[in-house]
Structures are given as structure tokens and as C-alpha cells.
Image (cartoon, rainbow, N blue to C red):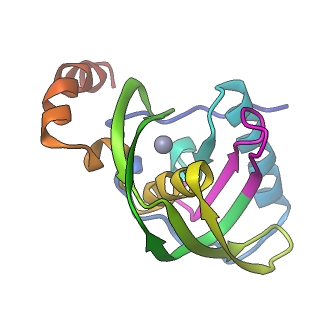
Amino acid sequence: MSLLKITTFPDTILRLKAEDITDIDQELIDLINSMYDTLYEYEGLGLAAPQISVSKKLFVIDTKKYYEDGEKLLLINPEIVEKEGSEKLEEGCLSVPDIHCEVKRAIKILFRGYNLDGKLIEREAEGLLARVIQHEFDHLNGILFIDRISTINKHKIAKDLKKLKEKG
Ligand SMILES: [Zn+2]
């Protein structure tokens, strides 16, 4: 098992647009395994490569650990093709420790991306899985959940963010 260091706000790597992955090689497979180890260690639902300072289009998700109808999912070069509906729910992020806030997201999405075999998958997701995919997908575009919260909530968390900034 190998654990990776999680990059936290306000590190600028979290703000970069991640690059396409061109090769699925052993190095990438090792990285993915370490990302899963790290995800489980820190009890997250998802982890995107920029969160471990690798600016590449890749994320791992596992909602199965906490929810009976959950799922384990890994996506390379993902895209969100369609979004439907919207709902506000509380979110957190391993890269923005100790802050939780309501974020508006689509309820249902159509997404695609490559799996470890290099096969393109396209399918729908809804509810929690759709939310986690949207959250992780944002990381690949340099967007954090705190960018998507209401002005009132931004004021509420301003102090905590300042603390993180001073620490970082
Ligand atoms: Zn996150």
C-alpha cells in the first residue's frame, strides 16, 4: 500500500487545467492503485489526480464503501456530455479540509471517459454518483467546490478559508 500526499487549498496546482492522458502504462496503473489507497485512508468518496499534484485528467471514485448502492469507478480523460435537473447538497473535499458547504449540482448526468483497458465508456449517473463525478470533474478544470457556493455561504466560510491560506 502506498499513500500519496494530498495537496490542499490554496496550492496553485489545484487551479490548473489538467492534461489529457495519452498512455495507459504501468506507471499510470501504479498511480491509480496509490490513489485508491489514499482515498480509503482519508475516507473520501473521490480523488482527482490534481489533488495529489498530478495535473492529468484522471479521477477515482468509490461510493460503494459507504453506500449499499454505491459504485467503484475510475475515469481517464472524462467528459460530462449532458446535465439534467439541479439540487443543493452539502459537500466537502480532501483538498479543502474541515469545510463543508451546500453546492448546487445536476441530479443526472451523461458522462464518458476511458477505463483502465482503454475502452471508452459512456453512460448515465444520478444522485450521489453524479454529484461525485461532477465534483471530481471540476478538479480537472481547476475548479473547487468552494467556487460554486452561494455568496452568503462564501461569507460564512471566509474565516476558515483564510486559516487554510495562512497554513498553506
Ligand atoms: Zn474535491
Identified at 48% across, 52% down, the residue is 135
Q: Is residue 47 left or right of residue 163?
A: right
Instruction: From the top left corner, tell me how far across and down residue 112 is, in percent.
Output: 63, 76
Q: Position of residue 5 (x, y in %)?
A: 59, 31
- Residue drawn at the location 25% of the way across and 20% of the way down: 160
Question: Which of the 4 image quadrants contains residue 97?
Answer: top left
The foreground one among 127 and 93 is 127
Please give the range of residues in magenta.
54-73
> Would you say 80 lies left or right of 145 here?
right
- From the viewer's side, name the closer residue of 45 and 69: 69
From the top left corner, tell me how far across and down residue 115 is, in percent.
78, 69
Indicate whether residue 117 is drawn in magenta. Answer: no
Q: Position of residue 61 (x, y in %)?
A: 68, 49
Q: Quadrant of the N terminus?
A: top right
The rendered magenta stretch, by its main secondary structure, is classed as loop
Classify residue 89 as left or right of residue 117: left
Q: Inspect this view and state whether residue 151 appears.
A: yes
Query: Which of the 4 quarters of the picture holds residue 123?
Result: bottom right
Relative vertical location of residue 78 with respect to residue 41 in this rendering, above or below: below
Q: Is residue 152 left or right of residue 81?
A: left
Residue at the spot 26% in from the left edge and 44% down from the top edge? 149
Q: Is residue 5 above or below residue 28?
A: above
> Residue placed at 85% from the left, 61% from the top?
26
Is residue 20 visible from the viewing direction of this image?
no
Q: Quadrant of the C terminus?
A: top left
Hey, which quadrant is residue 79 in on the image?
bottom right
